[in-house]
Image (spheres, rainbow, N blue to C red):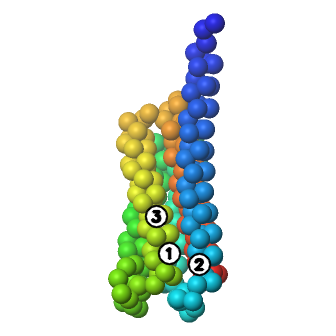
């Protein structure tokens, strides 16, 4: 029995959504495992008891929240087939993503200036965990930036006039990255 075009299209949509869901679940499980290891490691005698998060990480949190608003704006406009406003929302989101990355590196510079290193004689298990968690998130954010670039190009080519699935998946992934960073920030803030 052969599937109709609509049935095939629905199966494809469902498969793509499931692939994104499984990807996000595996990323979430990775961070759940790392944060669990972080909590267990806090009982070590060499754990740093007093530790200040860089101010740049707070700025990163504000920036990622703003980027969720701008991508929501873009999604609202892609539904209306308003290409110029969609482009504006995507461009702002992209810019905020770049600002997030810059503020993360600024946070790393703050950590180093305070004497907190990833490796070497001056490093601690505490700071190594901090670097691993933030750099791993940053790697996923780079993937989000690549996704944004693809979506911006596709929007420019008017590919979302009819089929908006790729756009919706990109928005879902971007929001996921935002929620993940907020989780990490709150976790690191309260479990230092």
Q: Nearer the viewer, mark 2 or mark 3?
A: 2
Q: Is residue 183 left or right of residue 155?
A: right
Q: Position of residue 98 (x, y in %)?
A: 39, 64
Residue at 52%, 29% in the rendered image = 162
Circle on res. 136: 3
Q: Quadrant of residue 100?
A: bottom left
Question: Label 1 neighbourhood size at 10 Å, few (<14), some (14-19), many (20+)?
Answer: some
State the CA–CA distance, disc 1 to disc 2.
Answer: 9 Å
Q: Quadrant of residue 168?
A: top right
- Say whether disc 2 or disc 3 marks the residue closer to the N-terminus: 2
- Say whether disc 1 or disc 2 marks the residue closer to the N-terminus: 2
Residue 106 shows in this picture: no
Q: Is residue 68 left or right of residue 94?
A: right
Q: Position of residue 84 (x, y in %)?
A: 44, 46
Q: Position of residue 55 (x, y in %)?
A: 49, 84
Q: Nearer the viewer, mark 1 or mark 2?
A: 2
Q: Is residue 186 left or right of residue 70?
A: right
- Say whether disc 1 or disc 3 marks the residue closer to the N-terminus: 1
Which residue corresponds to mark 1?
129
Which residue corresponds to mark 2?
41
Q: Position of residue 52 (x, y in %)?
A: 52, 88
State the CA–CA distance, disc 1 to disc 3.
Answer: 11 Å
Outermost residue, front side: 45
Residue at 53%, 88% in the rendered image = 46
Q: Is 160 in front, or is 104? A: 104
Disc 1 to disc 3: CB gap under 8 Å: no
Disc 1 to disc 2: CB gap under 8 Å: yes
Q: Is 29 in front, or is 97? A: 29
Residue at 41%, 91% in the rendered image = 114
């Amino acid at each position: 029995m052969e599937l109709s075009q609509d049935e095939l299209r629905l199966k494809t949509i469902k498969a793509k959504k499931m692939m994104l869901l499984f990807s996000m679940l595996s990323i979430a499980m990775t961070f759940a495992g790392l944060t669990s290891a972080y909590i267990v490691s806090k009982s070590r005698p060499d754990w740093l008891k007093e530790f200040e998060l860089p101010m740049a990480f707070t700025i990163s949190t504000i920036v990622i929240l703003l980027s969720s608003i701008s991508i929501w704006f873009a999604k609202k406009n892609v539904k209306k087939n308003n290409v110029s406003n969609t482009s504006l929302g995507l461009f702002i989101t992209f810019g905020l993503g770049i600002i997030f990355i810059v503020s993360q590196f600024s946070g790393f510079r703050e950590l180093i200036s305070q004497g907190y290193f990833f490796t070497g004689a001056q490093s601690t298990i505490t700071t190594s965990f901090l670097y691993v968690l933030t750099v791993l998130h940053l790697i996923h954010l780079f993937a989000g930036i690549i996704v944004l670039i693809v979506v911006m190009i596709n929007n420019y080519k008017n590919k979302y006039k009819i089929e908006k699935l790729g756009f919706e998946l990109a928005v879902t992934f971007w929001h996921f990255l935002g929620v993940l960073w907020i989780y990490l920030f709150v976790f690191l803030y309260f479990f230092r």
